[in-house]
Image (cartoon, rainbow, N blue to C red):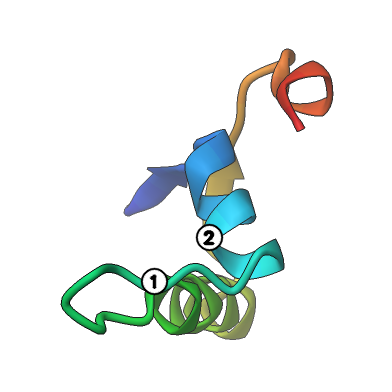
């Protein structure tokens, strides 16, 4: 079974609509990841400190 660890950076990419200098839309990649996880009902893990970090 596949599972994912979601770091604070992934949430920030999505919420801040981050784009790299070369034009890569990190927020779109993060959204696709969250949509995929939700669609497939995949187990995800995150740090207990995530709320403090955000």
Query: Where is residue 7 drawn, in percent x and y?
Result: 50, 36
Question: Circles 1 and 2: CB distance less than 8 Å?
Answer: yes
Q: What mark, if any, has residue 46 been given in the picture?
A: none
Sequence-earlier tag: 1 or 2: 2
Task: Report the residue marked by disc 1.
Answer: 26
Is residue 53 among what the camera can see?
yes
* Cα–Cα gap, marks 1 and 2: 6 Å
Pointer 1 local density, CA inside 10 Å: few below 14, some 14–19, many at least 20: some
Query: Where is residue 9 drawn, in percent x and y?
Result: 50, 43
- Give the secondary structure at mark 2: helix
In what quadrant of the picture does the C terminus appear? top right
Image height check: is 35 above or below 17?
below
- Using the rendered view, name the quadrant where residue 48 is placed: top right
Task: Report the residue marked by disc 2.
Answer: 13
- Residue 16 lies left or right of residue 2; in this view the side is right
Identity of the residue furthest to the left in this view: 22
């Amino acid at each position: 079974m596949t599972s994912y660890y979601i770091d604070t950076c992934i949430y920030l990419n999505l919420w801040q609509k981050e784009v790299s200098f070369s034009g890569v839309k990190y927020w779109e990649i993060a959204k696709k990841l969250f949509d995929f996880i939700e669609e497939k009902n995949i187990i995800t893990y995150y740090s207990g400190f995530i709320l403090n970090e955000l």
